Amino acid sequence: MPWRGSRNPYLIWLSEIMLQQTQVSQGTPYYEAFVANYPDVGALAHATEEEVLKLWQGLGYYSRARNLHATAKKVVSEYHGVFPATYKGLLGLPGIGDYTASAIASICYDLPTAVVDGNVFRVLSRIFGIDEPINTPKGARLFKALAQELLDVNRPGEHNQALMEFGALQCKPKNPSCTTCPLADICQAQAHGLVADLPVKLKKVKVTEHHFNFIVPLTAHGATTMELRSDKGIWPKLYQFPLVDSTISLTHETLLSSIDFLFITQDWQWSTMRRYNPEPYVHRLTHKKLFVTFWLLNEASFPGDLLHPEALKALPVPVIIERFISEFTPFRS
């Protein structure tokens, strides 16, 4: 991990924000790209939000990217480009909670604040045999207090990083290396056959299904149009093709007669419409399962700005739309 060994608050902050809800193998290339494009917090602060979202594209949970940008601007404008050197000060930055503040404070400033992430939850719950659900307020308080009690206050940064990596490399979620574990003799989960049962996590909310029908008008010269999503819901402030959202799968005929389609295309003209992907792309989000279909309207004319392929590729879009753009031959030229 390229950020290990660094005490630069900018690099530690960047890595911790990116690894929230993201595996290291997926997040590392994004980290390297951000550092290459924005080597310090000032460079990131002076980027546009659209540029930041484009570079973040595909990493998901886009509120992290917007908070990243907001924090960079706040550090530059209010702290003269220097991250606060206190836990409380770090907590005052957008998108920074207990975990990230504790990581920066301990790793960069040697402050005795324990870090509790998924790896730490797992290690502590197994060693101490704790079955309190980790995703409840009570569980969060319990594990934070335990981690704080165990913290080596003389080397808090090293201690936190070691505990996190122990969970990532040794005490893994599945198939942990129990036979070679240096803590096997004191591990309560190992002693009582509970390794596979810990940590305990309450079940997630029910996942709902949506059928997303993206309408892609194409002029005779291969231009199209897109719209900017709102700052609420999924994919905030990313661009998308006009959308018909349905709870059921739509055929060619039912789409043409739907109210949303008629509203979107009321001022449009086109020659033919055809389905691009015979089977919907399946895209999973935290609380949604999307079945995504792209519909092409050929030789279309429509009001608004025309987007040619090069301009289209520069816009930040959801990863499922990026897949379509990269596959669709007229947009690849």
Image: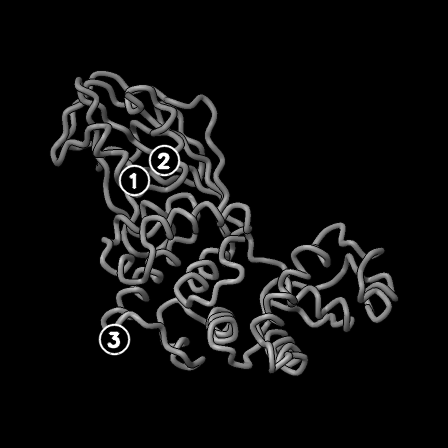
Marks 1 and 2, how far apart at CA: 7 Å
Which badge, 1 or 2, comes first in the chain's sequence?
1
Residue nearest the observer in this picture, 262 or 171:
171
Q: Position of residue 120 (x, y in %)?
A: 64, 67
Residue 128 image point, x, y percent: 77, 73
Residue type at mark 3 is Glu
When asked about the image quadrant of residue 157, the answer is: bottom right
Q: Is residue 205 above or below residue 303?
A: below
Label 3 vs 1, first from the N-terminus: 3
The foreground one among 41 and 130 is 41
Residue 210 in the figure: left or right of residue 54: right
CA separation in Å, label 3 and label 2: 37 Å
Picture disc at residue 240: 1
Using a 10 Å C-alpha cutoff, classify the residue at mark 2 as few (fewer than 14 neighbours), some (14 to 19) or many (20 or more).
some
Few, some or many C-alpha atoms within 10 Å of disc 1 (few <14, some 14-19, many ≥20)? many
Q: Secondary structure at mark 2?
A: helix
Residue under numbered circle 3: 78
Residue 227 image point, x, y percent? 23, 41
Q: Are marks 1 and 2 in contact (CB under 8 Å)?
A: yes
- Marks 3 and 1, how far apart in space? 34 Å
* Apparent side of residue 286 relative to residue 62 in the rendered image (left or right): right
Residue at 27% x, 52% y: name it. 230
Residue labelled with disc 2: 321
Q: Residue at x 36, y 54 (%)?
A: 233
Q: Residue at x 40, y 32 (%)?
A: 323
* Circle 1: residue type: Gln
